[in-house]
Amino acid sequence: MGPRIQYFDANTAGRDFVVGDIHGCFYMLDVLLERLGFDTARDRLFSVGDLIDRGPNSERAGEFIDAPWFHAIRGNHEQMLLDAVDEGGQARALWYVNGGDWFDALDVPAAEALTRRVRGLPLAAEIALGDGQRAGLVHANVIDDSWAKTRALLEHDVADTREFSQLLWNRDRASAVEDVSATQPTSSVAVDEIDVVYFGHTPMRDAIARANTRWLDTGAFMGWRLSVAELGVHGDVWSLPADLDDYRQGWRQV
């Protein structure tokens, strides 16, 4: 595994975007990036993880991981791939139940190459926004409502399996976002010591903004939408339906 958290300087040449859970629906991403006028020479695309499983083209994950303009963190489905390869048995059965059976169609060199790429993905990323602000990426949740604690955990040499699992699997913050009413304080979902944080993992009908959190898993593999947001505190979002007809623009504010 490479660094557990990866840091990026501000993009002074072009634009930065972040995409929600792709789950093999790379055909949707191709169309959305074309409509956004994405420039691979100047722009960057970040991913909150779950590139693979359930959708039609999971094998394309390696193509994107290799692209110099694409930067993904690890989702729980990437972790299931690694657990299946490393442990076999029940771990492989669990992954296959969750959409990992496409892996069997790869020849051995292709499977090994993709596994190496996935093993190098970090668990989180932090990106400078160019105005003194910072954006964070993590798949499911942060540690103790704090970006600083999350970053410290990931920079520490000793692994904490329980807390790493929270980053990849925990839905407590997503549940708070979905259940929150207008009268509840934003502190119920806000993350300290970071300007904006992007999450995936929990499918939601719309791309949601609440406090300084942004939620980008809009159920592409379920026939809902794939969402790409402009990286930044006030960045917009575009959500493309599975039929590729037209995209919806804007966050649902809750």
Image (cartoon, rainbow, N blue to C red):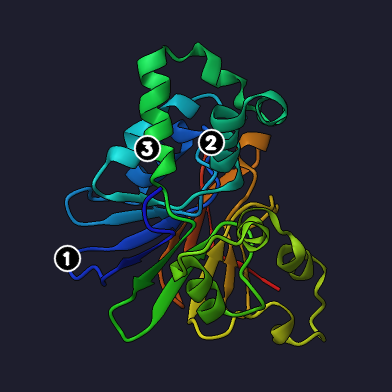
Crowd band around label 2 with a 10 angstrom C-alpha radius: few (<14), some (14–19), many (20+): some
Which comes before the other along the chain, label 1 or label 3?
Answer: 1
Q: Based on the displayed image, in which of its 4 quarters is residue 208 positioned? A: bottom right
Which residue in the structure is indicated by mark 2? 82
Task: Name the amino acid, label 2.
Answer: Leu
Crowd band around label 1 with a 10 angstrom C-alpha radius: few (<14), some (14–19), many (20+): few
Q: Residue at x 51, y 64 (%)?
A: 158
Query: Where does residue 126 sit, x and y in percent of width and height?
Result: 40, 69
The Cα atoms of the two marked residues, 3 and 2, are separated by 11 Å
Using the image, tell me which numbered label, if any, was put on residue 117. Answer: 3
- Identify the secondary structure beneath mark 3: helix
- Identify the secondary structure beneath mark 2: helix
Using the image, tell me which numbered label, if any, was put on residue 13. Answer: 1
Q: Residue at x 44, y 59 (%)?
A: 4
Left or right, residue 135 beside residue 78: left
Against 108, residue 52 (above or below) is below
The Cα atoms of the two marked residues, 2 and 1, are separated by 35 Å
Q: Based on the displayed image, in which of its 4 quarters is residue 226 positioned? A: top right
Task: Name the amino acid, label 3.
Answer: Arg
- Identify the secondary structure beneath mark 1: loop
Q: Are marks 1 and 3 in contact (CB under 8 Å)?
A: no
Question: Is residue 53 at all visible to an observer of this figure?
Answer: no
Which comes before the other along the chain, label 2 or label 1?
Answer: 1
Front residue of 236/232: it is 232
Which comes before the other along the chain, label 3 or label 2?
Answer: 2
Question: Is residue 49 at all visible to an observer of this figure?
Answer: yes
Front residue of 108/22: it is 108
Q: Residue at x 38, y 45 (%)?
A: 120
The Cα atoms of the two marked residues, 1 and 3, are separated by 27 Å
Q: Are marks 3 and 2 in contact (CB under 8 Å)?
A: no
